[in-house]
Amino acid sequence: MLITGLFMLIEVAGAILSGSLALFADAGHMLSDFAALLLALIAFRISHKPADHRRSYGYDRLQILAAFVNGLTLIGIAIWICYEAIQRFFEPVMILAGPMLVVALVGLLVNIVVFFILTRGGSENLNMKAAALHVLGDLLGSVAAIAAALIILATGWMPADPLLSIIVALLVLRAGYAVLRQSAHILLEGTPDNTPQDLIIDTLQAIDGVKDVHHLHIWALTAERRLATVHVVAEPHKTDQIRVAVSQTLVEKFHITHPTVQVEIRPCDS
């Protein structure tokens, strides 16, 4: 976060000096990176707070809320870059490609370092993915700024700057939409991806003593923490062992971290 914030100030100065939209857009994206990393950090800190009587599952969901906000900002930044780029096509601006190239090269190195820091653990955490996607978008922005600077130095063709900015903006837009869709799905208590409900029901019904499985609901607090509730109709003399068997199956085979099993000797009225 600190590395990104410091370089953002350098890039703003470089953008003002050179007049480059690609650099300025990249600096704007750096600002969003700084905010995204700050938001991710705050979310992680608060999510470690223990559960209480008001939030019985704790504060883990705050990470998903942070990812959702970061997804929205990615989309907003992409739209803004496209708008500014279109304006530049109609009103070309003289760009100093030399300073632009130097700042963009340093920016590329900074983004590579930060991206490595965020992804070296291989985490599936959506909050981390959202922050990493911000930085990846910025990395692509640096590549675009380098390419634009080289084209302008070689040919003097100024539209290369806004053209490459639009290409990067579209890539950022796609990444932002993916984060937004996934985080919204979790916030809406949607069934996690790669969770085959039909297979789960078939597997539970195959347990000895289980007569029927119904009211299966699966959702997630975060991308890693999955929860489930299920009603199981069991033979009267096997209710305890069936409850244990169903819970173990959900945990071990389907990675449900918090299963709640209601065992019945006859199907419930609902």
Image (tube, rainbow, N blue to C red):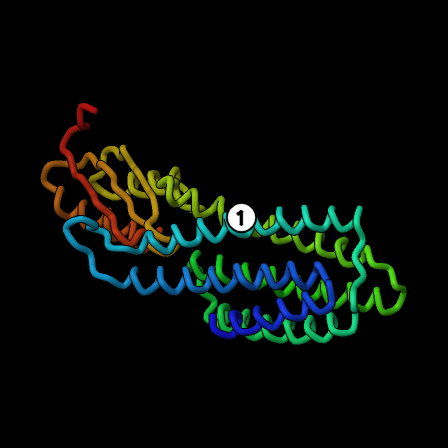
Q: Residue at x 23, y 52 (%)?
A: 57
Residue drawn at x 21%, y 24% is: 270
Hey, which quadrant is residue 165 in on the image?
Answer: bottom right
Q: Of helix, strand and loop, which one carries label 1?
A: helix
Q: Nearer the viewer, residue 58 or 199?
A: 58
- The answer to whether residue 253 of the structure is visible from this angle is no
Position of residue 200 in the picture relative to residue 177 (left or right) = left
Which quarter of the figure has residue 8?
Answer: bottom right
Residue at the top extreme?
A: 269
Residue 265: image location, x then y, percent: 13, 32
Pick the residue in front: 183 or 78.
78
For residue 46, say whether it is visible: yes
Q: Is residue 250 left or right of residue 65?
A: left
Structural crowding at the residue carrying mark 1, measured as other residues with C-alpha within 10 Å and reported as few (<14), some (14–19) or many (≥20) = some
Compared with residue 127, is residue 99 higher up or lower down, i.e. above or below?
Answer: below
Image location (x, y in percent) of residue 118: 49, 69
Residue found at x 56% / y 64%? 30
- Point out residue 80 in the picture as x, y percentages from the top left corner: 62, 48
Looking at the image, the residue that sits furthest to the left is 237
Which residue type carries mark 1? Ala
Residue under the point 90% across and 64% down: 155
Who is closer to the viewer here, 159 or 251?
159
Q: Quadrant of residue 206?
A: top left
* Total tally of numbered discs in the picture: 1
The location of residue 197, given as percent across then percent down, is: 38, 39
Q: Nearer the viewer, residue 212 or 178?
A: 178
Q: Mark 1 — residue?
A: 178
